[in-house]
Amino acid sequence: MFDVGVSDIAIYIPPYYLPHEELAKARGIPKEKFHIGLGNYKMAIIPNWEDAITMAANAASHLLEKTGTEPDEIRELVVGTESSVDHSKPIASFVHGLLKIGPRCRSYDIKHACYGGSAGLVSCIDRAYRITDSTYKAIVIMTDICRYDFGSPGEPTQGAGAVALLVRRNPCLFSMDTSLNGIFTKHVFDFWRPIGHDLPIVDGEYSIECYLMALEGAISHFCYNLGIKWEKLLGNLDYIIYHLPFGKMATKAHRHLIEIAYKDLDSESREALYTETYYKKVAPGLLGVKEVGNIYTGSVYMGLVSLLETEGDKVEGKNVGIFSYGSGCGAEFFLCHMKSGIDKIIRGLRFKEQLDGRKKITFEQYTQIYSRSCEEVDYYPEEVQIFKGPLTRFVFTGFKDHKRQYV
Ligand code: HMG
């Protein structure tokens, strides 16, 4: 039996944000609806000189740096994304070039809404287990720009960011036994973006129903694989990270789980159990969604980064349950067994530093930036120099002969 899983994690957040107070004021909505009703306080805004490729490359470059990994050691580069920039050329190919990874590396994108990155992660972990080359290393990146129509109910849940994970044998951060993973898939139209549409079509209420149905399906498969009854689930998990399209979704998901697992308890005891376990096991993963918003594929992994940032080395040796959901829909529930000695990994995250160093923009600047088509690029090197984040290594400068250019 080999120990396989994730050795390190890196996150990249764009350098601008809009506070929800400003959005609420401009839209004539009480700010409490966004803060309490949705659980979000700020949304990351991606400037014109960044895109899903730069965020992916910036996250992965930080990952290589913090682990001391040479680009040539990477045998597989997988990008989960729904923010593709080309019908044929994957984002992975751009990232492969920007990071100067060698030719003996399989590189490709995976798409299944917010679930795509998790599908890539599980398949790389399986490969690390099966392959005869014990030095196999893979980078799995989740990168997305979450966008909805101006003034739509989805608008306050927007965000942008990328997360990169290093997969290998004898991992330093967590191990995963993929044979236990609970899976759920069903063809539904809850959220989708037809070819030619810049923004998704969303059936908001139905999407929440589908999410909860998938949670139930994936967890019941997980419990079956583990050979336990539903009511034993919480006892096996020290923390739970749910896919986070907005902060309040975590309360809806956790409440649903408690209702199913403890249906025989009276409602008062169920409520007490909900409150106790929510604050202990779920809330420590919510920093990112409150400050950044939905980052689609990376959302649940930003939850993991938030947990590490908030709890620090208390997470060592603990079992973290992760529920990854992608509209359409595909979902997986899996267990990450956290390693000990992870303080260096946590210190190297620089997540708070990125959040605290961001520039606040106005509502007018937000609408201006997001009104431009993706073909219009205003590249001002002086602006980039002033406002780029501490981990910005790559920026998008425009097109030449229909080819995207980066420096
Ligand atoms: P909405 O129109 O804001 O819904 O849309 P609402 O009017 O029901 O209000 C939301 C909450 O705010 C309610 O609380 C209100 O009571 C409360 P709840 O009943 O939910 O507990 N509220 C207030 N609270 C305090 N003070 C006030 C106040 N007013 C109201 N004054 C919706 C919400 C999530 C539907 C919308 O934002 C949306 O369409 N979002 C996009 C879709 C989405 O995020 N779906 C989630 C599940 S699907 C998923 O996660 C996949 C996804 O990530 C995509 C992918 O896979 O790629 C989205």
Image (spheres, rainbow, N blue to C red):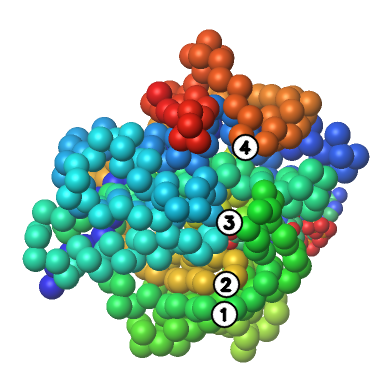
Residue type indicated by callout 3: Leu
Residue type indicated by callout 1: Lys
User: Mark 4 = which residue?
Assistant: 374
Q: Is residue 235 above or below residue 304?
A: below
Q: Is residue 230 left or right of residue 60?
A: right
Residue type indicated by callout 4: Cys
**Disc 4 or 3, which lies upstream in sequence?**
3
1 and 2 marks in contact (CB < 8 Å): yes
Under tag 1, what secondary structure? loop
CA distance separating discs 1 and 2: 5 Å
CA distance separating discs 1 and 4: 32 Å
Query: Tag on residue 329?
Result: 2
CA distance separating discs 3 and 1: 20 Å
**Disc 3 or 1, which lies upstream in sequence?**
1
Query: Tag on residue 244?
Result: 3
Residue at left offset 25%, top offset 55%: 106
**Disc 1 or 4, which lies upstream in sequence?**
1
Q: Residue at the right extreme?
A: 28
Residue at left offset 9%, top offset 60%: 133
1 and 4 marks in contact (CB < 8 Å): no
**Disc 1 or 2, which lies upstream in sequence?**
1
* Ligand 1 within 8 Å, label 3 CB: yes
4 and 3 marks in contact (CB < 8 Å): no
User: Mark 1 = which residue?
Assistant: 186
